[in-house]
Image (cartoon, rainbow, N blue to C red):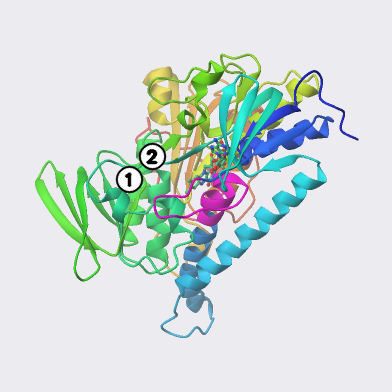
Amino acid sequence: MAPVKPSGQYDFDLLVIGGGSGGLACAKEASSFGKQVVVLDFVIPSEKGTTWGIGGTCVNVGCIPKKLMHQASLLGESIQEARSYGWNIPDPISFNWESLVEAVQNHIKSVNWVTRVQLRDKKIEYVNGHGVFEDAHTVVAKMKNGKERRITAKDIVIAVGGRPRYPDFPGCKEYCITSDDLFSLPTSPGNTLVIGAGYIGLECAGFLKGLGYESTVMVRSMLLRGFDRGMVNLVQAEMEDKGVKFLIGKIPVKVSKQPNGKLLVEWKGDDGIGQGEFDTVLVATGRKALSEELNPSAAGLQVHPESFKFITNAEQTNIPNIYAVGDVLHERPELTPVAIQAGKLLAGRLYNGIQEQMDYDNVATTVFSPLEYGCVGLTEEDAINRYTENEIEVYHAYYKPTEFFIPQKNVKHCYLKVITLLKAPQKVLGMHFIGPQAGEVIQGYAAAIKAGLTYQHLKDTVGIHPTVSEEFTRVAITKRSGDDPTPQSCCS
Ligand code: FAD
């Protein structure tokens, strides 16, 4: 369809600030309805000077390079296991960080290129400039060369995402890196301290250990805040078994460079002070929304006083023609598919008359720790808080993946849990799975939960044997019964 001219006095129908997951999805959808769209995307270099192309966090410094490095780590494990399956593999095997980074970066560059081609094909204008509000319909794009361009639009979508937050201690910005730098690090990270135990910190610590580097996680209070505590304990135990060290209840106070080039990290905790030497220190202590940098008050926009994120109603901010999607939304899951779905639906509502709203409930997610943890719905703690212990049932089981037997892999932490309402028909409230391919396992069950899954449906489902996912169709032991949830055999 040929684009129609924007109505009224504006340059464009839609201006999207941020060419990441949410912004691009919204822009492409809007252009498919014949709207004239411009996308601004600009990456301010990290403290270490790292920068990247269009596509946002997920493609450049998030999900994609993370998953590729996780896969590299799993492959190292598989090569070792292959010996017990009859493969002759030289001993020792070796790994080259520079080759991995080159392969990952080449893939990213190809995605950046495809994205630019898609925008051109869809006649969406791409401006590589940093957008700042002048008023509710005007944004000034500041280019790398210092030039400025004023752009007006009838509607504006904010999709600027966030960047890693640096904790405030001496030497932090000078010597530490963040996930923005890790995936393009030109030389191997060596012995690494990861400060922070959210999913990003744990995933990085996990794949670094799998690639052969010493890795230590420093955490102030708890790992994976917001996730099911019982499952998190198993994730931690598995990481410890794999050799990741944990410094729990510690906060960093200083990082300095030693004459030998190592980084000396000093910390304090309940048991006093401590220190250690590392080659790399990665801070992963949360992310900061890039809202303030937009000068939101110039457009009359309000942000939440603590998170500095936008509080929206159906993705609409307090200014009627300005919307927001993705990581920049207050109290919404910071996940790529969430940003994409919200962006697409918003464009559909604005320009194609659809009514469908974004549903932020029961969004499945996976922590790509060495043994992955996938989940959807409520944690056991949240289910107890929302209902009471007497109103819910928790089914659980340890299980033994068939492919773990021959290489005698650790099955101690392969575990799953289904949380249901106690009252018939026992609606499923949450599903949690630790094991191989956890994301693949949980995705289908997430669809089933959307469709009203009950415990009876699970029982009525015939499993696919031998898979790990079938364990959800066999789970029968309740926590309340106190019966032993460890498996007796694989096939009964
Ligand atoms: P972004 O993708 O961050 O895009 C925002 C874009 O806007 C960026 O390019 C930014 O530079 C640009 N920008 C900012 N301000 C301006 C401005 N003023 N003018 C112009 N441009 C601007 N999610 C998952 O679902 N699965 C995962 O496995 C996963 N792993 C992750 C691993 C890591 C290490 C990280 C950091 C994140 C991960 N995420 C994952 C989260 C996911 O990347 C984000 O939820 C997603 O990218 C958010 O999309 P967005 O559109 O809100 O913002």
Q: Foreground residue, 321 or 178?
A: 321
Residue range highlighted in magenta: 44-66
Identity of the residue furthest to the left in this view: 272
How many residues crowd around disc 2 within 10 Å: few (fewer than 14), some, or many (20 or more)?
A: some
In magenta segment, residue 491? no
- The residue at the point 75 percent across, 28 percent down is 12
Q: Position of residue 94 (x, y in %)?
A: 44, 79
- The residue at the point 53 percent across, 40 percent down is 365
- Residue type, label 2: Gly
Q: Which mark is residue 455?
A: none
- Residue type, label 1: Gly
Look at the image and tell me in which quarter the N terminus lies: top right
Q: Foreground residue, 113 or 70?
A: 113
Secondary structure category for the residue under label 1: loop
Quarter of the rendered image showing ligand 1: top right
How many residues crowd around disc 1 within 10 Å: few (fewer than 14), some, or many (20 or more)?
A: many
Q: Which residue is mark 1?
A: 196
Q: Is residue 411 visible?
A: no
Secondary structure category for the residue under label 2: loop
Q: Position of residue 104 (x, y in %)?
A: 56, 63
Q: Foreground residue, 351 or 359?
A: 351
Q: Which residue is mark 2?
A: 286
- Pointer 2 and pointer 1: residues touching (CB < 8 Å)? yes
Tell me: residue 333, above or below residue 123: above
